[in-house]
Amino acid sequence: MKKLTYRFSGVPVDYYLDHKVSALKKITDSKHSVLITDQHIYDAHPAIFKGWNTIVLRAGEAYKVQATVDEVVEQLIAMGADRKTTLVGIGGGVVTDLTGYIASVYMRGIRFGFVPTSVLALVDASIGGKNGIDVGVYKNMVGIIRQPSFLLHDLQLLRTLPVAEWQNGFAEIIKHACIKDAGLFRQLQAGSLEELVANPKKAAALIERNVRIKSEVVRRDETEQGERKLLNFGHTLGHALENQYELSHGQAVSIGMTYACHLSAKLKGFKDTGKVVRLLEQYGLPTYAAFDADKALEVLTMDKKRERKQMNYILLEKIGRGVIEAIPVARLGKMIRSLQEL
C-alpha cells in the first residue's frame, strides 16, 4: 500500500494507492460523511455502503446535469448535512465530477474525497480538481476547479468492470503517453489489454505511472494557463462528438486523437499518425468515424478552450511531446471539414 501527497495551491491531497475501500473509515468519519454513488456501483458492491449515509444516483452521463445537483442538495439538506460533513464520491467520472461540484457549492464548500471505480476515473477524472456538469451537448460547461482532500484506490473494484470500461480508460492512458511519455507509449505497444486485466500488479503500476503524470502536470499549472492544456489532446473534437453520438468518453477522445494526429501532420510535420492509430486499435478503441462536421463545429466553437476567435488545439510534434497551437476558428472549421475526406 502506498500513500502520496501532492500540494495544489498549497492544499494537500492525499493519494491512498492500492488500498482497500474498507480503509475509508480511517480517512473520514462515517457518522459525518455522505457517500455518493450510482445505481450500478451500489448494486455491484452493496457491502461498501453498509453503515454509511448514502445517496444513489441514476447511472450515466445523461444525469451529469444541474437537475441531479438540485436533487442531491435537497437530500443533503434532509439528511442534516452541514459545513463539517464530508462527501465521498464512489464511482466513475460522472460520480466524481458531480460529487466535487456539489461539495464545492453546498454551503459554499465542504470537504470531499473520491474512491474512483473505473480506469478512466483512476487515471484522469478524479485527479486535478476539475468538477462540473454538462449543459445540453456542451461537456463540462459549468464547473469549478477545487481539489479533493483525498483519493482512495481499491483496484479490486476493477474486477467487475466490463472490457468496454477498461478500453474507455485506456484512451486517457494513451493520451498521456502521446503528450508526455514516449517510454509509456512503447510499453503500451509491447503489452495488451488482456494482459493488464489479468495481472493486477502490472495494472497497479501502470495506473500509478499515469496518476503521477497527470498530478505533476496539474501541480505545475492547476488553473490551466499553459501546460495543463496539453491534457486536452483529443478532447476538443472528441467532446463535440461525445454527446451528439452517444459515445463513451474514451471512444470520443480516441476519435479526437486520431484526427488531432492528422492535424499535427499538416501543421507540425508529425510523422507517427499510423503508430498512434494502431495503438488505439490495439486497445479496442475506435479511430476514424463519419460525423456531421457542421454540427461538430457548432459545439466545438462553444468549447471552453476557445479564446475569442482562436481555439487552443493540442497537437503532437512527436510521440511524447504535445504542443499548444492557437488556430483561428475559421481556419479550424476548414480543417475539420477536410478530415471527413480521410
Image: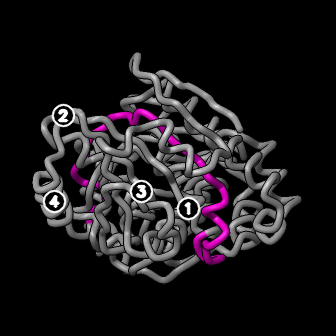
Q: Which mark is residue 47?
A: none
**Front residue (pair 275, 171):** 171
Q: Which residue is denoted by mark 3 in the rendering?
A: 236
Quick one: label 2, few (<14), some, or many (20+) residues within 10 Å?
few
Q: How is the image coloured?
A: one colour
Q: How far is the residue under mark 1 from the one under mark 3?
A: 23 Å
Residue bearing the label numbered 4: 75
Residue kind at label 1, given as amino acid type: Ser
Q: Is residue 85 left or right of residue 45?
A: left
The CA distance from mark 2 to mark 3 is: 37 Å
Distance of mark 1 from mark 4, alpha carbons?
Answer: 26 Å
Range covered by the magenta-colored residues: 138-165
Residue 279 x, y percent position in the rendering:
75, 64
User: What percent of the width, then of the height, locates residue 254?
Assistant: 57, 66
Residue at the spot x=66%, y=56% of the render? 155
Query: Which numbered disc covers residue 118?
Result: 1
* Mark positioned earlier in the residue sequence (2 or 4): 4
Q: Earlier in the sequence, mark 4 or mark 3?
A: 4
Label 4 packing within 10 angstroms: few (<14), some (14-19), many (20+) = some
